[in-house]
Image (cartoon, rainbow, N blue to C red):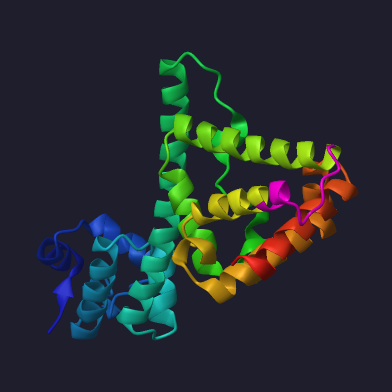
């Protein structure tokens, strides 16, 4: 049994032009072409068209469909790959929506939006380090938490963080000991700050991993020039590290 291109197009609810396009790109060739140049489609071609139309309805592009059919990949595998691509696109769109929303919030508040607030996630610039040290889960959850905040909430968080850093720097300038009560109060405040970030061991109440994280952060403040500069110099970073290590050893 065969169908002409017009018959198949009518049955499938598409146009003859679409079928000719599929033929032109090698996605669906006719079962045979008559002496008069007419295209005819048999059962195998119709079954292939059904697969194509199913994947098209689900939003898959023609190159992806061609790859699935060429490699004889099961539709389920093709759809799983399509889901992954859609989720990645959704994440990109959601990030753009948040950036525009924050810009609008700033305009309504008649404030100039900060570029790093609008365009960056909470851990974006440290993504590889966060994932390698604490896993993909910690990166994703903390970034989702950050992007869920309004512009003003993000600014408030940044102000709190800057206040914490300033308190550490002041303690260094006053030459207090890392094991002093003042330093340990700051260390406790630092750990509470970490506990407010979803996805971190401190937020999830994992004592063993929390201790490792606090010690690891202390080491990173000394080893990474970006963090050393945050505490003004190597001396400041070493002070913070030693205070955090002491707190992790004796109070966690």
Verify whether residue 16 appears in magenta: no
Q: Residue furthest top?
A: 110
The magenta region covers: 174-184
Q: Main secondary structure of the magenta part?
A: loop
Residue at x 89%, y 49% (from the top left corner): 235
Give the mark count.
0
- Residue 88 spot, x, y in % from top left: 45, 58
Q: Visible in this render: residue 249?
A: yes
Relative to 53, is 235 on the left or the right?
A: right
Residue toward you, 221 or 99: 221
Relative to 142, is 45 on the left or the right?
A: left
Q: Quadrant of residue 10?
A: bottom left
- Residue 94 spot, x, y in % from top left: 41, 46
The relative height of residue 104 versus residue 124 in the rendered view (above or below) is above
Q: Visible in this render: residue 25?
A: no
User: Which image quarter holds the C terminus?
Assistant: bottom right
- Residue 52 spot, x, y in % from top left: 28, 70
Residue at x 47%, y 26% (from the top left corner): 103
- Residue 62 spot, x, y in % from top left: 39, 64
The relative height of residue 186 versus residue 64 in the rendered view (above or below) is above
Residue at x 28%, y 58% (from the top left corner): 18
Q: Residue furthest front?
A: 181
Residue at x 70%, y 38% (from the top left corner): 167
Verify whether residue 181 appears in magenta: yes
User: Which image quarter holds the N terminus?
Assistant: bottom left
Residue toward you, 226 or 43: 226
């Amino acid at each position: 049994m065969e169908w002409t291109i017009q018959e198949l197009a009518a049955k499938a609810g598409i146009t003859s032009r679409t079928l000719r396009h599929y033929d032109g790109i090698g996605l669906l060739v006719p079962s045979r072409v008559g002496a008069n140049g007419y295209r005819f489609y048999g059962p195998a071609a119709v079954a292939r068209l059904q697969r194509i139309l199913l994947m098209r309805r689900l939003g898959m592009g023609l190159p992806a469909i061609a790859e699935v059919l060429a490699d004889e990949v099961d539709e389920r595998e093709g759809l799983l790959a399509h889901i992954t691509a859609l989720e990645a696109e959704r994440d990109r769109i959601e990030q753009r929506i948040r950036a525009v929303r924050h810009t609008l919030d700033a305009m309504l508040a008649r404030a100039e939006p900060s570029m790093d607030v609008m365009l960056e996630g909470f851990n974006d610039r440290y993504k590889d380090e966060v994932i390698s040290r604490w896993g993909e889960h910690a990166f994703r959850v903390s970034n989702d938490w950050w992007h869920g905040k309004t512009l003003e909430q993000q600014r408030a968080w940044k102000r709190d963080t800057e206040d914490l850093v300033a308190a550490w720097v002041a303690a260094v300038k006053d030459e207090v000991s890392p094991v002093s009560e003042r330093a340990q109060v700051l260390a406790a405040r630092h750990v509470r700050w970490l506990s407010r970030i979803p996805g971190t061991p401190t937020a999830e109440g994992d004592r063993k991993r929390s201790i490792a994280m606090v010690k690891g952060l202390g080491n990173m403040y000394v080893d990474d020039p970006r963090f050393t500069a945050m505490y003004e110099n190597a001396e400041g970073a070493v002070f913070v590290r030693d205070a955090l290590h002491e707190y992790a050893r004796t109070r966690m």
